[in-house]
Amino acid sequence: MKPVGDESLVELLARHARVAAETLPPDAYDYIATGSGEEIGLREAIEAWRSYRLRPHVLRDVSVVSTATEVLGHRLSAPILVAATAYHGLAHRDGELETARGVNAARALIVLSTRVTHRIEDIALQLEGPWWLQVYVMRNRELTRQLVLRAVAAGATALVLTGDTPYLGRKPRQGEPPVSDEQYLVNLTEHVAPGEDALRAASMDASITLDTIAWLREMSGLPVLVKGVLRADDAAACVEAGAAGVIVSNHGARQLDRTVPTAAALEQVVGSVGARVPVLVDGGVRSGVDVLVAIALGARAVLVGRPVLWALAADGARGVADALNALRDDLAHAMGLAGVTSIAAIGRDLIA
């Protein structure tokens, strides 16, 4: 493969995506790539970040630039986290175990999905840094409770409650997830009662409310962030209910199509709750300039999903590390050109 040092970030991410498309089985590729409905939201996600314009500072000493930051008490090398995405086993035979090795090399933080393809404990053993658990509340809430308690015991430091998935969005070009029942239930089978329909028990509970935030917090003792927030009023309600942070997300454009791009929703959410809790954002982030814009609009950090899966499919742990490191380096480069030397120095005044 071409050395990463000879590639721009754009070239690297494009190569990963191309190799993934050429090598993954079509059903696995489509599962990762597809969006819901007409995929309008999917097409708009990346362009929404590109619509912003910048006013850089000049004649500033930018000989040393640091991308280091802190998120919920964790000191990180950059405000770039790995988003929760399901079934890494579709992209690589070692699935999340291999992703974890790449995350370690990049000194990043990963959010593990409820729908991982390995046991939570086995993935945790691979991780050298902090990690969070993304939580789907299942119809049988005891399954959720047991999974959360196991994650706590394995070292999770926060929970991410997904709030935009009472049921799955319809994706015309994607069939059923190409995973076996064994993979789907890898962390749940042992908690299913004899005679219970395991697949039904593990499906999403459409009755969850703001009260679920307190339930998770009290049961786990961990801070709970709410993911899937696109409205200022919902963000405020989540914080009033005890959320320790919110993640502006439209689920990778995989739920309700035509939702507002996260790049457009971010600033209103920050204006509503950003002084009280950290606001994170995902969806369509593909460059250091995107990250710079997100931080300038008030985000504490961004999360990336599909680029990590394409990197995993193309080059395993090395690909994951290369993608995350290249994105961090691109952020540092953009910061220097914008005349700022630290994450704290990135302000709203940079946005035209």
Image: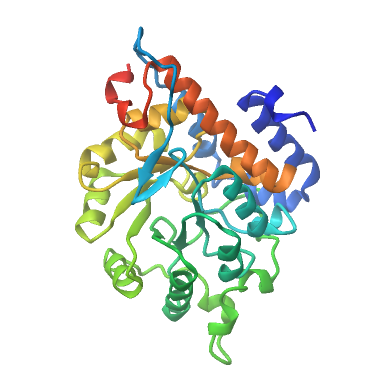
Res 286 visible = no
Nearer to me, 109 or 31: 109
162 relative to 297, above or below: below
Which residue is the extreme one toward the top? 59
103 relative to 56, above or below: below
Image quarter where the C terminus lies is top left
Q: Where is residue 13 in the image (x, y as percent from the top left)?
A: 65, 32
Q: Quadrant of residue 184?
A: bottom right
Q: In the visual, does 39 lie left or right of 32?
A: left
Q: Which residue lies at the image location 54% right of the left edge and 47% below the top edge?
A: 36
Image quarter where the N terminus lies is top right
Q: In the visual, does 267 lie left or right of 125?
A: left
Res 223 visible = yes
285 relative to 93, above or below: above
Nearer to me, 206 or 101: 101
Q: Which residue lies at the image location 34% right of the left edge and 37% below the top edge?
A: 299
